[in-house]
Image (cartoon, helix red, strand yellow):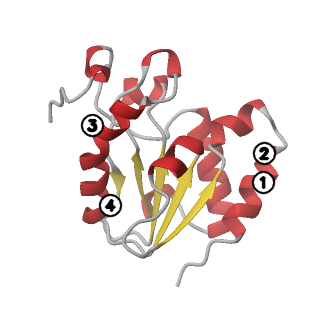
Amino acid sequence: MYCTDCRLCETRTHIVEAYGSTNAKVILVGEAPGANEDEGGEPFIGRSGKLLMKLVKEELGLDREDLYIVNSVQCRPPKNRNPKKDELEACKKNLMANLKACNAEVIITLGKVASGNLPEYEGKKVYSTYHPAAALYKGSLVEKIREDLKSVVIN
């Protein structure tokens, strides 16, 4: 896929598409790819992804392969800035297509941008927590993310 719907295409290395099983019970929705993700072409493969997968394993008992992982935008914003409103809007059709492709019962948004971009989805329970990158800079947020993950109900 070669997307040119917004200016993020001008600086990306790779489009970071959804990762995981479309049979997953949980979808993780991030904000935007970081440098590692832009280089590797997969979501949450850098330091914050490692922290996230550790917490998801400990609190939900799920491995990366058990999840469906997407971002609000598929291309890395310059200098890791937050995606702008028009960029989020341009990529919304991709996000919606990914959510439709995986009929998971639970959606977990990670960070303010993802939470604001997807407050609800087709009557499914949407849980929100901090982005794991924030916890790398402010260690006390690890416990908050852990508490939020403990509140997730998976049938």
Mark 1 secondary-structure assignment: helix
Q: CA distance from mark 4 to mark 2?
A: 27 Å
Which residue carries the number 3 mark? Answer: 90
Which circle's residue, 4 or 1, is located before the other in the chain? 4
Mark 4 secondary-structure assignment: helix
Number of other residues with Cα within 10 Å of mark 4, as a class: few under 14, some 14 to 19, many 20 or more: many
In screen coordinates, is 39 left or right of 3?
right
Looking at the image, do the residues carrying marks 3 and 2 touch, with CB atoms under 8 Å apart? no
Q: CA distance from mark 4 to mark 1?
A: 26 Å
Q: Against 7, is 86 above or below? A: below
In this rendering, which labeled residue sits more in front, label 1 or label 3? 3
* Among the 4 quarters of the image, the one containing residue 121: bottom left
Q: CA distance from mark 2 to mark 1?
A: 5 Å
Which residue carries the number 4 mark? Answer: 99
Looking at the image, do the residues carrying marks 2 and 1 touch, with CB atoms under 8 Å apart? yes
Number of other residues with Cα within 10 Å of mark 1, as a class: few under 14, some 14 to 19, many 20 or more: some
Label 1 is placed on what type of residue? Lys
Looking at the image, do the residues carrying marks 4 and 1 touch, with CB atoms under 8 Å apart? no
Which residue carries the number 1 mark? Answer: 144
Label 3 is placed on what type of residue? Ala
User: x and y percent of residue 84 in the render?
Assistant: 43, 29
Mark 2 secondary-structure assignment: helix
User: x and y percent of residue 86 in the render?
Assistant: 34, 32
Which residue carries the number 2 mark? Answer: 141
